[in-house]
Image: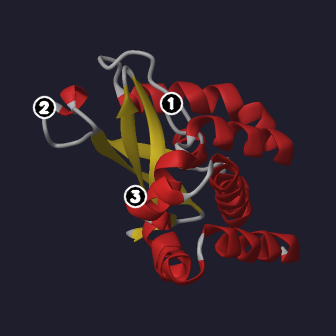
Amino acid sequence: MNKLNIIFFTLFFPCVIFSSNIDPVVFLENILIEIKPSLLHKDDFFLEKTIRKYVDFNEVAICVSGKQLWSLANEDDRLNFIDALATLMVSTYRKTVYYYIDSDIDFLRPKSKNFLDAKRKIQISSFMKKDNKSVNISYRLVKHGDSWLVFDILIEGISILKSLQTQYTALIKQYGIVYVTKKIHNSNSEK
């Protein structure tokens, strides 16, 4: 099976695992098989829709803003911030996903034999290979009940979540979520 296909889905099409006993790697592979036709046709609408469905942007938003400031924000401001983050993440990685969709992908199983029993979070690593180049991509998943969602992606060890925190956490503390949401929306409009 083409392993790149699996990785790209996992890049953004995190895993909603419907049973806590299902292997997260197998689940990611199945999702990739499901979405590959749309990725091959560079269907931006489907890509964004899928990412929004399987990435836990609420978890991302809480990590970026901080729990205390997040709890002080009203529902509309939270939803607007989540929307801005989702659009930013999709636009940032769209080209990478499309470039590697036909590459080989190898997933590395976690070293712990009990990784399927993870209580809250787990990390799954993979390697994408194309044109004699290899890229390490890791997916951090968070469990909600019996399902999993992606909350962070690391490309060559660089965390998307940490990058967002570095870029926006101090601004949120200083100016608030509404200001940062507008800043992100403006940045998204320029792309």
Q: Residue sitting at 70 percent across and 32 percent down?
A: 35
Query: Which tag, 1 or 2, sits closer to the chain's start?
Result: 1
Q: Which amino acid is tagged 3?
A: Lys
Q: Residue sitting at 13 percent across and 31 percent down?
A: 113
Mark identifier at residue 67: 3
Q: Which residue is mark 2?
A: 113
Q: Which residue is mark 1?
A: 29
Q: CA distance from mark 1 to mark 2?
A: 20 Å
Q: Whole-percent x and y of residue 41?
A: 85, 42
Task: Check if mark 3's residue and mark 1's residue have beta carbons within 8 Å.
Answer: no
* Side of 115 where 153 appears, left or right: right
Q: In the rendered image of this protein, does residue 163 appear above or below residue 110?
A: below
Q: Which amino acid is tagged 1?
A: Glu
Query: Which tag, 3 or 1, sits closer to the chain's start?
Result: 1
Q: Which amino acid is tagged 2?
A: Lys
Specify the quadrant that holds the C terminus: bottom right
